[in-house]
DNA sequence: ATAGGGTTAG
């Protein structure tokens, strides 16, 4: 090493250690200015550290990361991967895809296993089947198809895209599937609502001799809860007690959730009471468990207990439980009060799910017109699930006229959802409108034929 | 110097 190189290396090391100690954007910007002056603004290690701070640290600023990135002439893979990670955590994750497209074919920044791990996760969230398949092709072309992290990310992605066949195919091709691969394929089945398949795989995994971890148990228990498989859940509970995961918060939360969903509310409560260091999810699953079993009052008193003990700060899901408790207890006045408290005292913006709870609550009480007005006036876009909730209420209370209106909205959003026709046919039948009922049935059969291939989102048109 | 899987509406 020449003396000049040694000096440069020493300076680089000093900058790196200074950047490591950086604690705020203000501090980082000052350092960045000095780095530009000293001519290190094309040094990939130094600039990588800056990008990392801006793009993925808690005090980061993605906009600043972009402006820094744009001035780097030849960014390397680390810098690109870090930018992709940063976009993935941002409100516009599709920008990560744009960046990937821009760098394709540039020799100094060939995508690697890290790039694909990050991108696959982002595509899982975006739900784009086309992009997922394109990326899968690129992965195969680059020979990264059997890279463990990449393959497991692919598995997970196909599960999120509801393509259980491809996920299953991929899984069966793995010579020695590791724990993450097993957990992913089990979770794929849960996501695709194949709960029986998930539990079969869980059993198969045990037989293969692999030791389940906390994630395995959480996923398997959620499958039990979904189909109220209480005996299977109890068996898993006994397996957990044989391991040291009996103290894991998330495993215990899942046990509470499983028992509650299976109707064993007392067992759920028992576990809840014994959790050391309850977190907000512990409280939420218990409140929701009580609420969904008609113990609205108990759910609300548990919520108040949480506040009194200052145990945890309620979040958006807590209020879903609270509103659901009001719904199942028929407490309309209470629900409006809590809705206000949520926004005013806790500064939680109501999501579509909170409106869904309110629509459900008003609808159950027969106030379908109020429910419709709430949807009409809410500041966010309504989705098919909420319209369907209202349609179910219309059916329940024989409000055919409003049901017709709701039907039009559903046709726009999800014209192919089979249960809507069942709901509508039922609604017309209970109102004695037999002609309408058979029309609905015929249109269902017609549409089944025309149903297009699933999976295209806005990103597919990019 | 970076990475994979998980729990909370209807």
Image: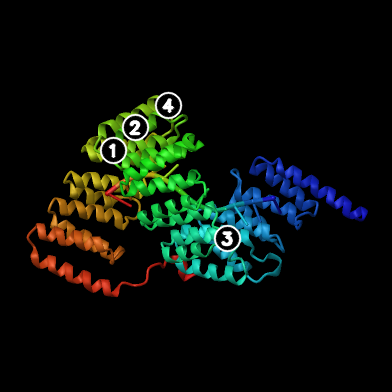
State the CA–CA distance, disc 2 to disc 1. 13 Å
Name the quarter where the N terminus of chain A is drawn: bottom right
> Label 2, on which residue?
A269
Total residue callouts: 4
Give the secondary structure at mark 4: loop
> Label 1, on which residue?
A291
Query: Can residue A441 be spotted in the picture?
Result: yes
Callout 3 environment at 10 Å: few (<14), some (14 to 19), or many (20+)? many
Contact, mark 4 vs mark 3 (Cβ under 8 Å): no
Tell me the quarter of the picture where residue A456 sits.
bottom left
Provide the chain ID for the residue under circle 2.
Answer: A
Please tell me which residue is depicted at 56% across the width and 56% down the height of the picture: A87
Horizontally, residue A448 falls left or right of residue A72, namely left
Q: Tell me which numbered mark, 2 or 1, is placed earlier along the sequence.
A: 2
Please state which of residues A308 and A418 is positioned toward the viewer in this rendering: A418
Q: How is the image coloured?
A: rainbow
Give the secondary structure at mark 3: helix
> Label 4, on which residue?
A310
State the CA–CA distance, disc 1 to disc 4. 21 Å
Please tell me which residue is depicted at 71% across the width and 45% down the height of the picture: A30
Please name which of the two marks, 2 or 1, marks the residue nearer to the observer: 2
Q: Tell me which numbered mark, 4 or 2, is placed earlier along the sequence.
A: 2
Give the secondary structure at mark 1: helix
> Label 3, on which residue?
A150
Please name which of the two marks, 1 or 3, marks the residue nearer to the observer: 3
Query: Can residue A346 be spotted in the picture?
Result: no
């Amino acid at each position: 090493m020449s003396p000049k190189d040694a000096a440069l290396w020493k300076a680089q090391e000093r900058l790196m250690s200074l950047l490591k100690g950086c604690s705020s954007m203000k501090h980082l910007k000052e350092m960045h200015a000095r780095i530009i002056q000293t001519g290190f603004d094309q040094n990939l290690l130094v600039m990588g550290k800056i990008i990392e701070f801006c793009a993925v640290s808690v005090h980061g600023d993605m906009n600043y990361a972009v402006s820094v990135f744009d001035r780097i002439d030849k960014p390397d893979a680390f810098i690109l991967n870090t930018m992709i990670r940063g976009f993935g955590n941002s409100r516009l994750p599709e920008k990560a895809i744009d960046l990937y497209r821009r760098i394709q074919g540039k020799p100094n920044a060939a995508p690697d296993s890290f790039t694909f791990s990050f991108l696959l996760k982002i595509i899982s969230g975006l739900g784009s089947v086309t992009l997922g398949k394109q990326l899968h092709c690129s992965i195969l072309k680059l020979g990264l198809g059997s890279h463990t992290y990449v393959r497991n990310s692919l598995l997970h992605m196909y599960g999120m895209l509801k393509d259980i066949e491809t996920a299953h195919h991929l899984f069966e091709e793995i010579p020695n599937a590791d724990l993450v691969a097993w957990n992913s394929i089990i979770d794929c089945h849960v996501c695709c609502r194949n709960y029986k398949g998930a539990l079969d795989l869980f059993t198969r995994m045990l037989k293969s001799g692999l030791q389940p971890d906390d994630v395995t148990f959480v996923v398997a228990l959620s499958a039990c809860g979904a189909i109220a498989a209480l005996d299977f859940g109890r068996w898993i509970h006994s397996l957990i007690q044989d391991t040291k995961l009996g103290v894991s918060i998330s495993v215990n939360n899942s046990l509470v959730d499983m028992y509650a969903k299976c109707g064993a509310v007392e067992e759920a409560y028992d576990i809840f009471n014994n959790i050391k260091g309850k977190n907000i999810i512990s409280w939420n699953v218990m409140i929701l468990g009580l609420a969904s079993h008609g113990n609205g009052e108990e759910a609300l008193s548990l919520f108040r207990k949480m506040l009194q003990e200052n145990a945890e700060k309620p979040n958006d899901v807590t209020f879903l439980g609270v509103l659901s408790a009001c719904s199942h207890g028929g407490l309309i006045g209470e629900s409006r009060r809590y809705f206000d408290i949520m926004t005013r005292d806790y500064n939680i913006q109501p999501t579509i799910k909170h409106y869904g709870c309110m629509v459900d609550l008003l609808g159950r009480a027969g106030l379908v017109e109020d429910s419709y007005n709430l949807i009409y006036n809410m500041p966010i876009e309504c989705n098919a699930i909420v319209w369907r909730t209202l349609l179910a209420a219309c059916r329940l209370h024989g409000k055919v006229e409003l049901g017709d209106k709701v039907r039009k909205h559903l046709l726009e959003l999800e014209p192919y959802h089979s249960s809507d026709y069942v709901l509508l046919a039922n609604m017309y039948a209970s109102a004695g409108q037999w002609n309408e009922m058979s029309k609905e049935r015929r249109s269902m059969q017609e549409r089944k034929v025309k149903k297009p291939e699933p999976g295209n989102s806005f990103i597919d048109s990019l």
